[in-house]
Amino acid sequence: MECPTCGKIYQIKIQVDRNIGIYEWPISFECQNCGEILEYTYSPKGFRPKAKSFEPSPSDPPITTIGYSSSLPITDDLYLKDLDYLQSMALSSPFINLSSHGHFTMEEISAFDGFLQRMQDNLLPYKGVLKALLPILKKGNVKAFSKKLADFFGKKNYKDLSSTQEVYDTYFELLEKSYHNMIPPRYEEDYFQKYVKPLRDYLDKVTANDVKQIKDKLDESGKISIWYKEKALPYIAQMADEIQKFISSIIYASAGVGNVKSRGDLKVVTISFDDAVDKYEEGYEIFANGLKIIAGLNNIVENGNINTFTNPKLGGAIGIIEFASLSVGKMVEHLENYTTMADYLNGAMNNKIRNASTHNSITYDPITQEVLCYYNPADQSKVYNTTLMEICWLCYLQLLHIIDATLLARKIVEKGK
Ligand SMILES: [Zn+2]
């Protein structure tokens, strides 16, 4: 690649895997020399804009290199480093490089590979389906919805639907399937089975009248059906359609690692910083408004009452409605000592990143991918350090949490009619 502004040359080392043939993959980085943001896409047809053709030779001077993989994190020594011919050949591929650095064990990488294969078969070819069907769902056009389904999955696999109820049920079935194809087995065990399944089981077990009471209570601070229709579903559909930007962060969920930083310095090359931060802020606000659904149900399961929080902060007893009217930051603070909720959230609602980003006091170093969050506008010495990879991981967690809350809300709305 040649920077169009200053002429600096970059070498991109691409991991050619199964994913790379499915889409046009984004590549985004900042020119070290002049600061220009260079943006390319890579597909089986090659680069756009077109790359220079270049045959490496041992006599070449070192060349700034970027490792690129659609699905794996990139190690530091393959990210914007000047490599001579021999070094460049030795760091043969992002895959071999990642496995030889000890960030993840061979077992963890191959478990992730198994998950990716399933994702490539069952999710990626259909990642746009939720987005394509959403406007038709809103319109309630049963015939058009059936036709669109057949376009995606083939006529044989889908019978014509006959009512708006069936259309909604089908959409939520697709959402449920998409969710299970987005989570690796480890996450399914560690999070879904442990924190979400008990809440669903509870709703299945109790009477419709009990569920109606839950629904009425939660609706007091804004209807939960409006929340998922207006906020959650459009966000989920968009994120599912852009899931390729976040795949390399899913390896942490696959290895059962909750803390991204504990696995060292790894880079992501499929999303720009601005894009990732925008997604983070959006997910934060939407999930904050759905938090009462999960917290309320958890209160019932854990403490027998929708209004009873475990170890509440902020000076004690507030009910679910008072909780829902707190500012989003206070909501998260309120749950800090609530072990089940804090473990489930897994840091996805990080106030420091969110505060810094809403106050526009967040800085990004494109060479190290380090992010500094000045989260207290009154005190510039208060800084939270994070990385682009961690922000991508948190976006991924938010997406899963928002789907959890949406599917629970749908269950409450349907059973508590
Ligand atoms: Zn340049």
Image: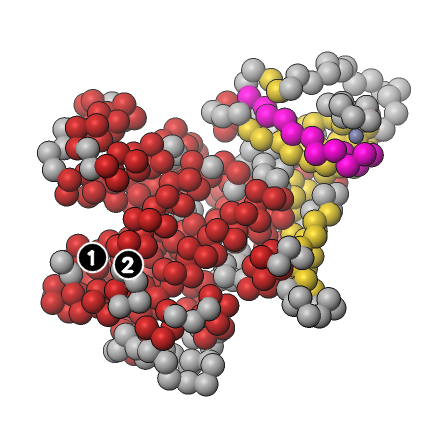
Nearer to us in this view, 359 or 395: 359
Amino acid under disc 2: Ile
**Res 413 label:** 1
| Residue range corresponding to the magenta coloring | 31-43
The CA distance from mark 1 to mark 2 is 8 Å
Residue 312, given in percent of the width and then of the height, sits at 42, 80
414 part of magenta stretch: no
Numbered disc total: 2
- Report the residue at 34% width, 41% height from top: 178
Image marks 1 and 2: residues in contact by CB distance under 8 Å: yes
10 Å crowding of disc 2: few (<14), some (14-19), many (20+): many
**Above or below: residue 18 compared with residue 30:** above
Is residue 225 visible from the viewing direction of this image?
yes
Residue at the spot of label 2: 224
Residue located 68% across and 70% down the image: 378
Residue 259 in sight: no
